[in-house]
Image (cartoon, grey):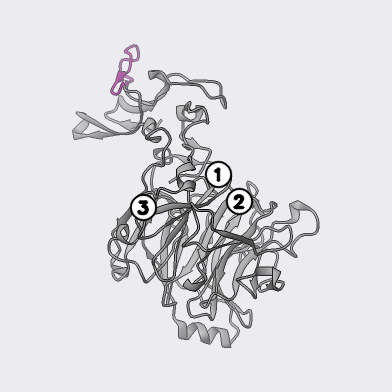
Amino acid sequence: MTPAAISETRVAVAIIREQKTELGKPSQGRKMEHYRQIEIFDTSVPEKPPLQITQKKADHYNPAVLEGGTRIGFHRCRTEMLLKGGGKVIPRKIQKLETPPSHADVGLFRLSDAFPAISSDGSKLAFVDNEFKAVWVADSQGLRVLCKRSANRIFSVVWNPDPAKDTLYICEGPSFSRGEEVVICALRGVSNGGGQGELEELILTNGVFNNAFPSCNPDGTQMVFRSTRDRSTGNADDRQHKNLYIMPNAVEGENAGQAIQLTDGAWTDTHCSWSPTGDWIVFSSTRSKPDDAPPLDNGLDSGYFAVYLVKATDRHVIRVVTSAAVTIAGHVNHPVFSPDGTRIAFTSDLAAVSADPISLPIFLHSVRPYGDIFAVDLDLGKLEGCAKRKEDIMDIHEFHRLTHSRYEYSMPAWTSKAVNDPAIQWKLSLLDDEKTRKFKPSCPYMHKDQGESWHMTGQLCLPKRCC
């Protein structure tokens, strides 16, 4: 695989000589032939064995011809380094990226986990690990496990913007499973909770629905979220539509009053975020999907997501970022407002991934490789004019691309309280509390018995999410 031509007759490739075990069954250890190695084939002398460039117990990728064919470059991956110290948590890092000129006033950082959420005062960073089974919180004291469930049970964390409430919201249930129940839960007393068991947990949603992606208004009294309620005919297969709802009481949830429907239609409205100014809610939706588009793609939405704004008061919806018109790959998702409400950042695969797909792993449970982070500037005056005239399209065509690589960038978070070195603000050294000590992560590359699995012998297909 991944051939690189040296001359008219010679080519360097990555090759696996022997399948390690029967597909789907784990085994302990790997021989040299089980690893992906770099070899050179010469078609002018077919009887001559290929030249073996690498012979190490590691996987080698992407041969590249250098200096006229006198040198061969490649990537190498050693999976035994993934579990350090007998299964302890691998140290996390916050990486600072270069910001493009269009956003020179904005710092850009990358975290090696999912669903980052920054408290309104900037003192706390929360996120979900790549197994979607634990919520972590980092502050000036260090890093700790706030709560944990079984794998693939927690996603979409977000803070209540009122620091006095000291509340973090999570979605509990399987992700990417529209027919499964997902509840929104409030974690109260975050500052004192965690390892000492003082955390108060309260389920805010009622009914067996798929509820997710909550976001509070600026004072933290109300919450917008997406739900499958009122979109089902009783058949689980029909439960593919999602709309937005507003919970009047973000503290007690539906225990204090039923949620009010904000949008209504046979489509998917999701990934909602309330503006810091309180007047607009931004969300991602498939409502503009063409009539001839496939209804589903492997059981999920087939694409054509675009970004919309809706007035929380009069329910008027305006499209501000359209999806790709020539492909079902147009996923424009996870929009968030800048702290001053004048910009929107989102993740999108509008720009094609320009790298050999075998060069990095395929994530089987990742809904799609979103691609990169983009941002657009809002003309608030024009937006208000469209709302008064009841116009429903104000597409912005000037995009600012903030990231550009083969990695999956998704779920942005924006804060005005960060510093140049976030490692000072949010220490990622582990605290010595009970929940953090007992937490044992699983390596996404290995089976539970620590044997490397069959997918390591070919295209790297990972059955769990990781970054």
* Residue 418 x, y percent position in the rendering: 34, 67
Q: Residue furthest right?
A: 234
Residue 284 visible to an observer of this rendering: no
**Between disc 1 and disc 3, whose residue precedes?**
1
Q: CA distance from mark 3 to mark 2?
A: 29 Å
First along the sequence among labels 1 and 2: 2
Number of the label disc, if any, that sits on residue 428? 3
Q: Nearer the viewer, residue 354 or 208?
A: 208
- Asked if residue 285 is among those painted magenta in the image, a careful observer would answer no
Residue range (magenta):
41-55
Q: Indicate whether 408 appears above or below 80.
A: below
Three-letter code for the amino acid on which mark 1 is drawn? His
Q: Secondary structure at mark 3?
A: loop
Residue depicted at x 71% and y 73%: 257
Whether residue 117 is situated above or below residue 36 in the rendered picture? below
Instruction: Answer with mark 3 or mark 2, whichever residue precedes in sequence.
Output: 2
395 vs 385: above or below: above
At label 3, which amino acid type do we have?
A: Leu
Q: Position of residue 449 (x, y in %)?
A: 51, 27
Residue 321 % position (x, y): 50, 69
Query: Which residue lies at the image location 74% right of the left edge and 61% below the top edge?
Result: 207
Depth check, mark 3 against mark 2: the one in front is 3
CB within 8 Å, label 1 to label 3? no
Is 5 in front, or is 436?
A: 436
CA–CA distance in space, label 1 to label 2? 8 Å
Q: Is label 1 in contact with label 2 (beta carbons under 8 Å)?
A: yes
**Marker disc for residue 365:** 1
Task: Please give the residue where the numbered disc 2 appears in the rendered image.
Answer: 176
